[in-house]
Image (cartoon, rainbow, N blue to C red):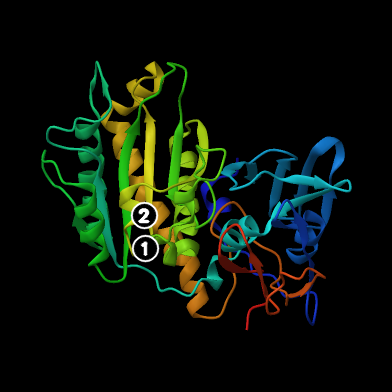
Amino acid sequence: MRGWSAILAAVFLAASHVGAFDWTVIKFEGRDYVPLQDVARFYNFIQADYSYDHLQLSNTVLRMQGSVNSRELYLNGLKFILSFPIIGIDNRPAISRIDLSKLVEPVLRPARIQTAPARTIVLDAGHGGFDQGARSVRGNEKDFTLDVVLRARDLLQAAGYNVRLTRSADVFIPLELRAAFASYQSNALFISVHFNSGMRADAEGIETYCLAPRGVPSSNDITLTFSDFRPCLGNVRDPENIALATAIHTALITRLGVGDRGIKRARFVVLRDNTVPGVLIEGGFLTNAVDDMRVANPAFRQNMAQAIVQGIEAYNRAVERGTAGSAGAIAKGNTAPPLSSSINTNSAAAATPGSIWTPFSNDVYALPEAAK
Protein backbone atom coordinates (compact mmCIF):
# COMPACT_ATOMS: atom_id res chain seq x y z
CA MET A 1 0.00 0.00 0.00
CA ARG A 2 1.19 3.48 -0.75
CA GLY A 3 2.40 5.89 1.90
CA TRP A 4 0.08 8.34 3.61
CA SER A 5 0.94 11.35 1.51
CA ALA A 6 0.52 9.44 -1.76
CA ILE A 7 -2.76 7.94 -0.68
CA LEU A 8 -4.39 11.23 0.18
CA ALA A 9 -2.78 13.48 -2.42
CA ALA A 10 -5.25 15.07 -4.83
CA VAL A 11 -4.21 14.84 -8.46
CA PHE A 12 -6.03 17.16 -10.83
CA LEU A 13 -6.35 16.07 -14.43
CA ALA A 14 -7.77 18.04 -17.35
CA ALA A 15 -10.76 16.58 -19.20
CA SER A 16 -9.75 14.60 -22.26
CA HIS A 17 -13.20 14.32 -23.85
CA VAL A 18 -15.76 16.89 -24.85
CA GLY A 19 -19.51 16.30 -24.98
CA ALA A 20 -21.81 13.69 -23.51
CA PHE A 21 -20.68 10.25 -22.37
CA ASP A 22 -22.98 7.43 -23.45
CA TRP A 23 -23.35 4.95 -20.61
CA THR A 24 -24.43 1.46 -21.64
CA VAL A 25 -26.98 0.19 -19.13
CA ILE A 26 -27.73 -3.53 -18.99
CA LYS A 27 -30.79 -5.02 -17.31
CA PHE A 28 -30.06 -8.24 -15.45
CA GLU A 29 -32.61 -9.89 -13.15
CA GLY A 30 -34.42 -6.58 -12.74
CA ARG A 31 -31.35 -4.59 -11.77
CA ASP A 32 -29.27 -2.08 -13.75
CA TYR A 33 -25.60 -2.77 -14.45
CA VAL A 34 -22.92 -0.79 -16.26
CA PRO A 35 -20.06 -2.54 -18.12
CA LEU A 36 -16.70 -1.95 -16.50
CA GLN A 37 -15.46 -1.07 -19.96
CA ASP A 38 -17.58 2.08 -19.68
CA VAL A 39 -16.21 2.73 -16.19
CA ALA A 40 -12.69 2.45 -17.56
CA ARG A 41 -13.40 4.94 -20.33
CA PHE A 42 -15.23 7.43 -18.12
CA TYR A 43 -12.58 7.53 -15.37
CA ASN A 44 -9.71 7.32 -17.86
CA PHE A 45 -8.28 3.96 -16.79
CA ILE A 46 -5.76 3.52 -19.57
CA GLN A 47 -5.17 -0.19 -18.88
CA ALA A 48 -7.89 -2.81 -18.49
CA ASP A 49 -7.48 -6.55 -17.90
CA TYR A 50 -10.55 -8.79 -17.69
CA SER A 51 -8.88 -12.21 -17.86
CA TYR A 52 -10.06 -15.30 -15.97
CA ASP A 53 -13.00 -13.60 -14.23
CA HIS A 54 -10.61 -11.19 -12.55
CA LEU A 55 -10.49 -7.54 -13.49
CA GLN A 56 -7.99 -4.77 -13.08
CA LEU A 57 -8.36 -1.20 -14.27
CA SER A 58 -5.46 1.17 -13.81
CA ASN A 59 -3.96 4.51 -14.70
CA THR A 60 -0.96 6.39 -13.38
CA VAL A 61 -2.49 7.03 -9.94
CA LEU A 62 -5.24 4.48 -9.38
CA ARG A 63 -5.75 0.73 -9.56
CA MET A 64 -9.18 -0.92 -9.32
CA GLN A 65 -9.38 -4.69 -8.81
CA GLY A 66 -12.22 -7.15 -8.41
CA SER A 67 -13.65 -10.49 -9.48
CA VAL A 68 -16.82 -11.63 -11.17
CA ASN A 69 -19.39 -12.95 -8.66
CA SER A 70 -17.65 -11.15 -5.79
CA ARG A 71 -18.70 -8.13 -3.73
CA GLU A 72 -15.09 -7.23 -2.95
CA LEU A 73 -13.58 -4.26 -4.75
CA TYR A 74 -10.08 -2.89 -4.16
CA LEU A 75 -8.93 0.64 -4.92
CA ASN A 76 -5.14 0.82 -4.64
CA GLY A 77 -5.33 -2.05 -2.18
CA LEU A 78 -8.05 -0.55 0.02
CA LYS A 79 -10.94 -2.98 0.43
CA PHE A 80 -14.58 -2.06 -0.23
CA ILE A 81 -17.63 -4.31 0.01
CA LEU A 82 -20.02 -3.64 -2.87
CA SER A 83 -23.78 -3.75 -2.43
CA PHE A 84 -24.07 -6.34 -5.22
CA PRO A 85 -21.50 -8.67 -6.79
CA ILE A 86 -19.76 -7.81 -10.03
CA ILE A 87 -21.37 -9.91 -12.76
CA GLY A 88 -20.33 -11.19 -16.16
CA ILE A 89 -22.72 -10.62 -19.07
CA ASP A 90 -21.71 -11.79 -22.56
CA ASN A 91 -18.12 -12.09 -21.33
CA ARG A 92 -18.21 -8.50 -20.08
CA PRO A 93 -17.81 -7.72 -16.36
CA ALA A 94 -20.34 -5.20 -15.10
CA ILE A 95 -20.94 -3.32 -11.85
CA SER A 96 -24.35 -2.43 -10.47
CA ARG A 97 -25.48 1.08 -11.21
CA ILE A 98 -26.15 1.62 -7.51
CA ASP A 99 -22.54 0.76 -6.67
CA LEU A 100 -21.29 3.04 -9.44
CA SER A 101 -23.44 5.91 -8.19
CA LYS A 102 -23.22 5.35 -4.44
CA LEU A 103 -19.65 4.10 -4.06
CA VAL A 104 -17.33 4.48 -7.04
CA GLU A 105 -18.32 8.03 -8.00
CA PRO A 106 -18.22 9.70 -4.53
CA VAL A 107 -15.00 7.87 -3.63
CA LEU A 108 -13.21 8.81 -6.84
CA ARG A 109 -14.65 12.32 -7.11
CA PRO A 110 -15.53 13.57 -3.60
CA ALA A 111 -15.09 17.17 -4.69
CA ARG A 112 -18.37 16.85 -6.60
CA ILE A 113 -20.24 16.23 -3.34
CA GLN A 114 -22.31 19.30 -2.52
CA THR A 115 -21.24 19.88 1.06
CA ALA A 116 -18.94 22.08 3.12
CA PRO A 117 -15.98 21.01 5.28
CA ALA A 118 -17.06 20.17 8.83
CA ARG A 119 -15.87 22.15 11.83
CA THR A 120 -17.86 20.27 14.49
CA ILE A 121 -17.01 16.65 15.23
CA VAL A 122 -19.32 14.46 17.30
CA LEU A 123 -17.35 11.61 18.88
CA ASP A 124 -19.31 8.62 20.10
CA ALA A 125 -17.69 6.14 22.48
CA GLY A 126 -19.57 2.88 22.00
CA HIS A 127 -21.42 1.21 24.88
CA GLY A 128 -21.03 2.48 28.47
CA GLY A 129 -22.49 1.93 31.93
CA PHE A 130 -24.10 -1.49 32.28
CA ASP A 131 -23.46 -2.11 28.57
CA GLN A 132 -19.86 -3.31 28.60
CA GLY A 133 -19.69 -4.31 24.94
CA ALA A 134 -17.07 -6.85 23.94
CA ARG A 135 -14.87 -8.18 26.74
CA SER A 136 -11.42 -9.68 27.04
CA VAL A 137 -8.99 -10.54 29.82
CA ARG A 138 -7.36 -7.15 29.21
CA GLY A 139 -10.44 -4.97 29.48
CA ASN A 140 -13.90 -4.00 28.28
CA GLU A 141 -14.87 -2.41 25.00
CA LYS A 142 -16.71 0.44 26.73
CA ASP A 143 -13.48 1.57 28.43
CA PHE A 144 -11.29 1.27 25.34
CA THR A 145 -13.74 3.23 23.20
CA LEU A 146 -13.97 6.07 25.71
CA ASP A 147 -10.19 6.25 25.96
CA VAL A 148 -9.83 6.57 22.17
CA VAL A 149 -12.56 9.21 22.01
CA LEU A 150 -11.00 11.32 24.75
CA ARG A 151 -7.63 11.16 23.01
CA ALA A 152 -9.21 12.13 19.68
CA ARG A 153 -11.08 14.99 21.38
CA ASP A 154 -7.84 16.50 22.64
CA LEU A 155 -6.20 16.22 19.23
CA LEU A 156 -9.19 17.72 17.42
CA GLN A 157 -9.51 20.61 19.84
CA ALA A 158 -5.82 21.35 19.43
CA ALA A 159 -6.43 21.46 15.67
CA GLY A 160 -9.22 24.01 16.13
CA TYR A 161 -12.29 21.79 15.81
CA ASN A 162 -15.44 22.13 17.87
CA VAL A 163 -15.87 18.73 19.55
CA ARG A 164 -18.99 17.20 21.07
CA LEU A 165 -19.08 13.88 22.94
CA THR A 166 -22.11 11.60 23.27
CA ARG A 167 -20.59 10.47 26.56
CA SER A 168 -17.52 11.56 28.50
CA ALA A 169 -17.83 9.09 31.38
CA ASP A 170 -18.85 5.50 32.04
CA VAL A 171 -22.58 5.99 31.51
CA PHE A 172 -25.15 4.33 29.27
CA ILE A 173 -26.63 6.48 26.50
CA PRO A 174 -29.41 5.00 24.32
CA LEU A 175 -28.50 4.67 20.65
CA GLU A 176 -31.40 6.85 19.53
CA LEU A 177 -30.23 9.70 21.76
CA ARG A 178 -26.72 9.48 20.34
CA ALA A 179 -28.05 9.87 16.80
CA ALA A 180 -30.41 12.68 17.82
CA PHE A 181 -27.62 14.54 19.62
CA ALA A 182 -25.43 14.42 16.52
CA SER A 183 -28.30 15.46 14.26
CA TYR A 184 -28.80 18.67 16.24
CA GLN A 185 -25.26 19.81 15.42
CA SER A 186 -24.65 21.97 12.39
CA ASN A 187 -21.81 21.49 9.91
CA ALA A 188 -20.81 18.32 11.75
CA LEU A 189 -19.43 14.80 11.31
CA PHE A 190 -20.26 11.79 13.48
CA ILE A 191 -17.57 9.23 14.40
CA SER A 192 -18.63 6.21 16.47
CA VAL A 193 -15.79 4.14 17.95
CA HIS A 194 -16.19 0.45 18.72
CA PHE A 195 -14.17 -2.72 19.05
CA ASN A 196 -15.27 -6.06 17.71
CA SER A 197 -15.94 -9.58 18.93
CA GLY A 198 -16.15 -12.70 16.80
CA MET A 199 -17.35 -16.26 16.96
CA ARG A 200 -13.90 -17.35 15.76
CA ALA A 201 -10.69 -16.48 17.55
CA ASP A 202 -8.87 -15.93 14.24
CA ALA A 203 -11.15 -13.05 13.17
CA GLU A 204 -8.99 -9.92 13.19
CA GLY A 205 -8.57 -6.48 11.67
CA ILE A 206 -10.40 -3.19 11.30
CA GLU A 207 -13.63 -2.48 9.43
CA THR A 208 -15.39 0.83 8.92
CA TYR A 209 -19.13 1.10 8.39
CA CYS A 210 -21.33 3.72 6.83
CA LEU A 211 -25.06 3.65 6.19
CA ALA A 212 -26.34 1.34 3.46
CA PRO A 213 -28.18 3.15 0.64
CA ARG A 214 -31.87 2.48 0.30
CA GLY A 215 -32.67 -0.72 -1.57
CA VAL A 216 -29.44 -2.64 -0.94
CA PRO A 217 -28.56 -5.29 1.65
CA SER A 218 -26.15 -4.62 4.49
CA SER A 219 -22.65 -5.91 3.82
CA ASN A 220 -23.06 -8.77 6.28
CA ASP A 221 -26.27 -9.90 4.57
CA ILE A 222 -26.62 -11.72 1.27
CA THR A 223 -30.25 -11.22 0.32
CA LEU A 224 -32.56 -8.21 0.32
CA THR A 225 -35.29 -7.88 2.94
CA PHE A 226 -38.31 -5.62 3.15
CA SER A 227 -36.58 -3.41 5.72
CA ASP A 228 -33.82 -2.64 3.20
CA PHE A 229 -36.31 -0.52 1.25
CA ARG A 230 -37.38 1.66 4.16
CA PRO A 231 -36.03 5.20 3.89
CA CYS A 232 -33.53 6.19 6.58
CA LEU A 233 -32.79 9.72 7.72
CA GLY A 234 -29.11 9.20 7.11
CA ASN A 235 -29.55 8.35 3.43
CA VAL A 236 -29.66 12.05 2.59
CA ARG A 237 -25.92 11.91 3.33
CA ASP A 238 -25.07 8.85 1.21
CA PRO A 239 -22.24 10.53 -0.77
CA GLU A 240 -20.69 12.11 2.32
CA ASN A 241 -21.03 8.87 4.30
CA ILE A 242 -19.00 6.74 1.90
CA ALA A 243 -16.47 9.52 1.32
CA LEU A 244 -15.95 9.94 5.07
CA ALA A 245 -15.69 6.17 5.57
CA THR A 246 -13.04 6.00 2.86
CA ALA A 247 -10.97 8.78 4.39
CA ILE A 248 -11.20 7.39 7.93
CA HIS A 249 -10.55 3.79 6.91
CA THR A 250 -7.58 4.76 4.75
CA ALA A 251 -6.00 6.58 7.69
CA LEU A 252 -6.65 3.71 10.11
CA ILE A 253 -5.27 0.98 7.87
CA THR A 254 -2.28 3.02 6.79
CA ARG A 255 -1.29 4.36 10.20
CA LEU A 256 -2.03 1.28 12.30
CA GLY A 257 -0.79 -1.39 9.88
CA VAL A 258 -3.56 -3.83 10.81
CA GLY A 259 -5.71 -6.21 8.80
CA ASP A 260 -8.13 -4.55 6.36
CA ARG A 261 -11.62 -6.03 6.67
CA GLY A 262 -13.04 -3.39 4.40
CA ILE A 263 -15.37 -0.44 4.15
CA LYS A 264 -18.83 -1.86 4.71
CA ARG A 265 -22.50 -0.88 4.83
CA ALA A 266 -24.98 -1.37 7.65
CA ARG A 267 -28.09 0.18 9.18
CA PHE A 268 -26.92 0.64 12.76
CA VAL A 269 -29.21 2.99 14.69
CA VAL A 270 -26.50 5.62 15.18
CA LEU A 271 -26.01 5.77 11.40
CA ARG A 272 -29.59 5.15 10.27
CA ASP A 273 -31.19 7.90 12.36
CA ASN A 274 -28.40 10.44 11.93
CA THR A 275 -28.70 13.42 9.60
CA VAL A 276 -25.00 14.35 9.62
CA PRO A 277 -22.35 12.35 7.74
CA GLY A 278 -21.25 9.48 9.92
CA VAL A 279 -19.22 6.30 10.25
CA LEU A 280 -18.86 3.52 12.79
CA ILE A 281 -15.36 2.13 13.32
CA GLU A 282 -14.70 -1.42 14.55
CA GLY A 283 -11.10 -1.01 15.64
CA GLY A 284 -10.11 -4.65 16.10
CA PHE A 285 -11.32 -7.88 17.71
CA LEU A 286 -11.05 -8.26 21.46
CA THR A 287 -11.64 -11.97 20.85
CA ASN A 288 -8.41 -12.17 18.84
CA ALA A 289 -5.20 -12.47 20.85
CA VAL A 290 -3.14 -10.17 18.60
CA ASP A 291 -5.82 -7.51 18.17
CA ASP A 292 -6.62 -7.60 21.88
CA MET A 293 -3.00 -7.03 22.80
CA ARG A 294 -2.85 -4.07 20.42
CA VAL A 295 -6.04 -2.46 21.71
CA ALA A 296 -4.92 -2.82 25.33
CA ASN A 297 -1.78 -0.82 24.51
CA PRO A 298 -2.26 2.95 25.15
CA ALA A 299 0.15 3.73 22.29
CA PHE A 300 -2.12 1.90 19.85
CA ARG A 301 -5.16 3.81 21.07
CA GLN A 302 -3.29 7.10 20.71
CA ASN A 303 -2.32 6.11 17.18
CA MET A 304 -5.93 5.25 16.45
CA ALA A 305 -7.06 8.66 17.70
CA GLN A 306 -4.48 10.33 15.47
CA ALA A 307 -5.69 8.30 12.48
CA ILE A 308 -9.26 9.46 13.11
CA VAL A 309 -8.11 13.07 13.06
CA GLN A 310 -6.11 12.51 9.87
CA GLY A 311 -9.13 10.92 8.21
CA ILE A 312 -11.35 13.85 9.15
CA GLU A 313 -8.84 16.33 7.77
CA ALA A 314 -8.48 14.31 4.55
CA TYR A 315 -12.26 14.29 4.10
CA ASN A 316 -12.47 18.04 4.68
CA ARG A 317 -9.72 18.73 2.17
CA ALA A 318 -11.41 16.57 -0.45
CA VAL A 319 -14.88 18.10 -0.20
CA GLU A 320 -13.49 21.61 0.20
CA ARG A 321 -12.12 21.37 -3.33
CA GLY A 322 -15.69 21.03 -4.53
CA THR A 323 -16.59 24.44 -3.15
CA ALA A 324 -13.83 25.82 -5.35
CA GLY A 325 -15.07 23.93 -8.40
CA SER A 326 -12.23 21.41 -8.49
CA ALA A 327 -12.27 17.63 -8.73
CA GLY A 328 -10.15 15.36 -6.56
CA ALA A 329 -10.11 12.04 -4.77
CA ILE A 330 -9.96 11.15 -1.12
CA ALA A 331 -8.00 7.98 -0.93
CA LYS A 332 -5.18 6.15 -2.60
CA GLY A 333 -4.78 8.11 -5.79
CA ASN A 334 -7.30 10.13 -7.74
CA THR A 335 -9.96 9.98 -10.37
CA ALA A 336 -9.68 10.61 -14.06
CA PRO A 337 -10.96 13.68 -15.90
CA PRO A 338 -14.57 14.65 -15.21
CA LEU A 339 -16.58 13.79 -18.31
CA SER A 340 -20.14 14.48 -19.40
CA SER A 341 -22.63 11.63 -19.28
CA SER A 342 -25.90 10.66 -20.82
CA ILE A 343 -27.70 7.36 -21.07
CA ASN A 344 -27.62 5.03 -24.03
CA THR A 345 -30.21 2.35 -23.35
CA ASN A 346 -33.33 0.99 -24.97
CA SER A 347 -34.83 -0.05 -21.64
CA ALA A 348 -38.38 1.07 -20.99
CA ALA A 349 -37.30 1.79 -17.42
CA ALA A 350 -35.02 4.61 -18.48
CA ALA A 351 -35.80 7.93 -16.84
CA THR A 352 -34.44 11.34 -17.80
CA PRO A 353 -30.90 11.53 -19.18
CA GLY A 354 -28.41 11.04 -16.35
CA SER A 355 -30.53 8.70 -14.25
CA ILE A 356 -32.38 5.38 -14.53
CA TRP A 357 -35.22 3.95 -12.49
CA THR A 358 -34.44 0.77 -10.58
CA PRO A 359 -37.48 -1.22 -9.44
CA PHE A 360 -35.52 -2.84 -6.63
CA SER A 361 -34.65 0.41 -4.90
CA ASN A 362 -37.64 2.65 -5.60
CA ASP A 363 -35.08 5.41 -6.09
CA VAL A 364 -33.44 7.10 -9.05
CA TYR A 365 -29.64 7.01 -8.88
CA ALA A 366 -27.82 9.33 -11.24
CA LEU A 367 -24.94 8.14 -13.33
CA PRO A 368 -21.72 10.18 -13.06
CA GLU A 369 -21.67 13.42 -15.00
CA ALA A 370 -19.15 16.11 -15.82
CA ALA A 371 -18.31 18.94 -13.48
CA LYS A 372 -20.27 22.05 -14.37
Q: Judging from the image, what secondary structure is the residue with disc 2 in?
A: helix
Q: Residue at x 84, y 45 (%)?
A: 49
Image quadrant holding the N terminus, namely top right
Name the residue type under label 1.
Leu
Q: Which mark is residue 362?
A: none
The answer to whether residue 160 shows anywhere in this view is no
Give the mark nearer the N terminus: 2 vs 1: 1
Q: Residue at x 48, y 33 (%)?
A: 257
Rendered image quadrant of residue 343: bottom right
Rendered image quadrant of residue 134: top left
Q: Residue at x 69, y 70 (%)?
A: 13
- As rendered, which of 145 and 300 lies closer to the eye? 145
Q: Is residue 104 left or right of residue 111?
A: right
Q: Which mark is residue 233?
A: 1
- As rendered, which of 238 and 162 lies closer to the eye? 238
Q: Judging from the image, what secondary structure is the residue with disc 1 in?
A: helix
Image quadrant holding the C terminus, namely bottom right
**Label 2: which residue?**
272
Q: Is residue 277 left or right of residue 265?
A: left
The picture places residue 87, in percent across and down from the top left corner, at 75, 45
The picture places residue 235, in percent across and down from the top left corner, at 43, 62
The answer to whether residue 268 shows anywhere in this view is yes
Q: Is residue 35 left or right of residue 145?
A: right
Image: 122 above or below 197: below
Q: Are marks 2 and 1 in contact (CB under 8 Å)?
A: yes
Image: 336 above or below 124: below
Alpha carbons under labels 2 and 1: distance apart: 6 Å
Name the residue type under label 2.
Arg
Q: Residues within 10 Å of mark 1 (few under 14, many from 20)?
A: some
Q: Residues within 10 Å of mark 2 (few under 14, many from 20)?
A: many
The picture places residue 159, in percent across and down from the top left corner, at 28, 60
